[in-house]
Amino acid sequence: MVVVLLDDPRSGLDGDDRRGARISGRRVAVGAAVAAVPVLLIVLQIVASRNGFEGPLHSLWNDFVGTPKSVSVPWAGLALALVGVSWRRRFIILGAALAIDAVFAVVRVLHGGPLTIGNGAVIALTGLAVVAWLGWEGADKHNALHAAALGALLILATKVGDVWLHITVLAGPNVLDRYVLLADHALGEPSWVMGRVIEAIGPVGYGVLHWVYIELPVAAMVVAAWQLRRVVSSGIWPNHYLVRTFLVLGLVGPVVYVLFPVVGPMFAFAADGHGLQIGNYWPHTVPPLDHIPAALPFDTVTPRNCMPSMHTAWATTVFLHSRRAADGSPAPRWLRWGGAFWLLATLTATLGFGYHYGADLLAGGVLCLTVESALRAPERGWDRTRIQLVAGGTALLATMLLSYRYLAVWMSQHPFPAGVILLGLFAAYVWAFHAAWFARSAMPRPVTAERVHAN
């Protein structure tokens, strides 16, 4: 009777055969993904070399033996990798990373280079992966390689992202900031408002917000490490956690950069526009509204990475995943408050530093909720609710982009109804997302996850 309930009587496969087929299909998918990574890196390196900017392989080489581009990202990647090993091994790996970093830092300074760190973290992460692959067996090997892959992907994603920013410049010589400014009039020009607020709070507030803005990977690492903290002791990997959403957003979001190139207020409407700005308006004066907008030719340096705001999308992901544990129980208070602070501080910084318009933030929020709806609670399958949320979010994001481009003049001429419609649609989608994934009782539920066996 149990077999009848679990297996489709019309299928020629019994339960063991079907499970074996699923495992085989998963291995094929993982193998294809692993093979695609070096191919992507090589292609991007070729593109970078031909166009005169640093490619991902060159940047990785510097992380190993040169001057790392980032201090925090390598260590965030290593910290994420350490969730897959025991406490004893964590201390050994951490000690080795610190010692290697100290040696590299001393040698670099003695040769007149900058005082920075990061080499040790990358080398230790690589060493962990090699030792686990060649020397460990069973659950120890699986957990270590799984976590090391996540840490490596975090580092590699930043390398790919850096190259993609240069590609946005090549693909978008003209930017659409004039259109977005008109659309933003329906939202009250929040970048101009927050820019003046940032000036008013002084250098301390500016410094805190700047640190929050640039250290978003650290916040993501903290939340992910908390979600995966029991992987070693329980042998269970949750079916969904922050890193999955983070990486998918990094693949999907930047595509829009090429389709909708925008540089931001501090470049298009302030002195950082390298002489190509419309004027030095931001943040003190809202530019006169141009009701016959046109694309603005811009420089070959500034990335076209405003639409959508990926910082908003990623910070929203941090916020969502800091709410609850995998079993539905509330996350600890410190994590929930930390996630809320990081989201609010990131939104304040993106607007107040002049990096984004309000319209960018709405698009980033919709993108995050759409991707999260596609990935969250995979055990539910593609039911009606998931399909509606993903389709609705995709349609809403497309509608926003088309409106910013083709209805911008109307939105500036009728700011109140345009703003109400735009914010109303966004609020409705947020409500639908909350109703689908968070409105249910927060009572703990059984965790559907991948269990790793020793054999």
Image (cartoon, rainbow, N blue to C red):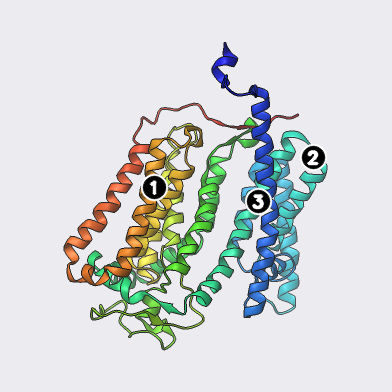
Q: Amino acid at mark 2?
A: Trp
Give the residue furthest to the top. Answer: 1
Residue 453 horizontal side relative to residue 181, left or right: right
Query: Between tags 3 and 2, which lies in front?
Result: 3
Residue at numbered disc 2: 136
For residue 73, above or below residue 143 = below
Q: CA distance from mark 3 to mark 2?
A: 23 Å
Q: Earlier in the sequence, mark 3 or mark 1?
A: 3
For the C terminus, give its image quadrant. top right
Residue 190 in which image quadrant: bottom left
Q: CA distance from mark 3 to mark 1?
A: 26 Å
| Helix, strand or loop for disc 1 | helix
Q: Residue 420 appears at what percent x and percent y?
A: 20, 57
Q: Residue 383 appears at what percent x and percent y?
A: 43, 35
Give the numbered dot on residue 33: 3
Please tell me which residue is depicted at 65% across the width and 45% down the height of the picture: 29
Camera-side residue: 108 or 415? 415
Residue at numbered disc 1: 391
Disc 2 crowd rating (10 Å Cα; few below 14, some 14-19, many 20+) is some
Q: Earlier in the sequence, mark 3 or mark 2?
A: 3
| Helix, strand or loop for disc 3 | helix
Disc 3 crowd rating (10 Å Cα; few below 14, some 14-19, many 20+) is few
User: Is residue 335 visible in the rendered structure shown here?
Assistant: no
